Image: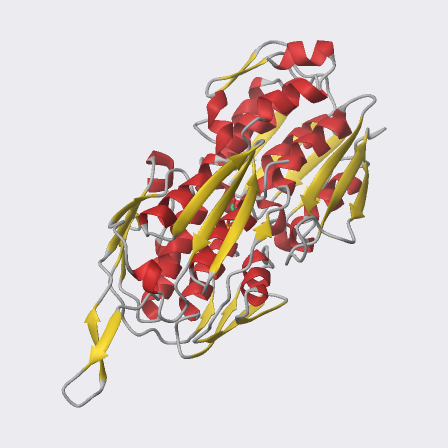
Amino acid sequence: MPSDKSIAHRALLFNAMATGSAQITLRRPGADVLSTVQVLSDLGVVAGMEKTDGSVTVTVRGGGTTDAARLAGGGGERMDCGNSGTTMRLLCGALAGRAGTTAAGPAGEAVEASGPRAAELYGDTSLSSRPMERVAGPLRAMGADVATTDGHAPVRVGGHRPLRSMHHALPVASAQVVSAISLAALAAEGTTTIDTPAETRDHTERLLAWLGADVRREGRRTSIKGPARMQARSLTVPGDISSAAAWLVAAALHPDAELRLLDVSLNPSRLAIVDVLREMGTDIKVEAQEALPGGSSPEPVGDLVVRTATTLRPISLGGDRVAPLIDELPLIAVAMAAANGVSELRDAGELRVKESDRIAQVVRHLVAMGVNAEELPDGWRVTGGRRARLVPLPVGTGGDHRIGIAFAIAALSGLTGEALVDDPACIDVSYPGFWEDLEAVSDQTMAGAAR
Ligand code: S3P
């Protein structure tokens, strides 16, 4: 599997905010992760990049958290975040707390001699339509100079201002927002606490603590004590369970399959997809590794072994269960279409502000497959199990990698005829080599159907 996108962004960025240098090894990094490498390079903190055998090792050299000289310096007034919401949102928090250089004032006091120049973060059309005030608002409340363009990108992050620690209660369960605030909180004096309405992925908390910051996650609360100092540490980023999810669903729906997915991140906050597919009737084994390749890691790693589901049961999902599944929901919709009976998803309004409106897109494509699917304001209702229309399915992805992957798997699984994916390259955002992997796991007939 390609390296986990969430962990990769964080390993690169957090090490750039730490003292010393670190080597981050990424397997088949996607375009989103390369957007983070690019902005860090613009900021002058990428010291080298080496490619071997599908992997890339990036050497990041930071300047220390509270006096983040390296993040403060360099060029990079306009930084291209591409399609990557995680790059843009986390960078807002990281840049909000960067310091200028100090000099002695008339009475010997420290005064700011030169502040960092303002940065303007921009992205592609999809990223430019996604909400950014959810990050900018809390950062401003901490004293940061952050401005959106009518709530969207481009986002301008101004020169250093002293930041205040705060308590935030977030209206949406978003790991990206928690992470952005956490990064700003590293530079603020005192303890910042962030509460979310549901538990989200905790990669930020794990990695910041591993680098030496005083950061804790307890249930729905994250606490960060600033100012923090962190020491850079090298890391091999494990495989992405959100990419692995494609094959978990493909094997579940196949009449006779067994797949082993190697070196996947087994972070408990990301394993909800395994629980869901098990509840639907799939046999999945999680085999954690004792000793990790590359030594110590803040993330558990192991293999997933998945076998055909003999009968696939419908499922109803909502409430707290949604946030930990957020990226897997289009694939879960495909499994719902194959399950015998009525499945439902509620409380997933966040899907409408992802790389595309995933509720509208999923339902539109399921209906085109002949599946009885209904759009709800915050999810969908799918009556599965009937034989769908085995005619070619035009898949307009809207440039959204997760839509392309989900409906390629629908075709591979024989739920529809050929999937004619209009923009196969958009999958490179998270999963370069997806089409080759699809060929590799397909038998002759299925490879033909999916092409
Ligand atoms: C991510 C968090 C999720 C997810 C995205 C990556 C992260 O977004 O959809 O693909 O790395 O923090 P939200 O936290 O905004 O829901």
The part of the image, by quadrant, that contains residue 124 is: top left
Q: Position of residue 319 (x, y in %)?
A: 62, 53
Does 450 sit above or below residue 140?
A: above
Quadrant location of the C terminus in the rendered image: top right
Frontmost residue, 133 versus 96: 96
Looking at this view, name the residue that lies furthest to the bottom: 107
The color scheme shown is secondary structure
Q: Is residue 90 left or right of residue 407?
A: left
Q: Is residue 141 above or below residue 239?
A: below
| Residue 410 in sight here | no
Residue lying at 55% horizontally and 42% vertically, measured from the top left: 26
Residue 258 position within the rendered picture, expressed as x and y whole percent measured from the top left? 81, 28
Q: Is residue 350 visible?
A: yes
Query: Is residue 413 or residue 313 the one in the foreground?
Result: 413
Name the residue at 54% across, 33% down: 402
**Residue 35 lies in quadrant:** top left
Q: Which residue is at 40% across, 52% downward?
A: 89
Out of 143 and 312, give the one closest to the viewer.
Answer: 143
Note whether 130 is above or below 91 in the view shown.
Answer: above
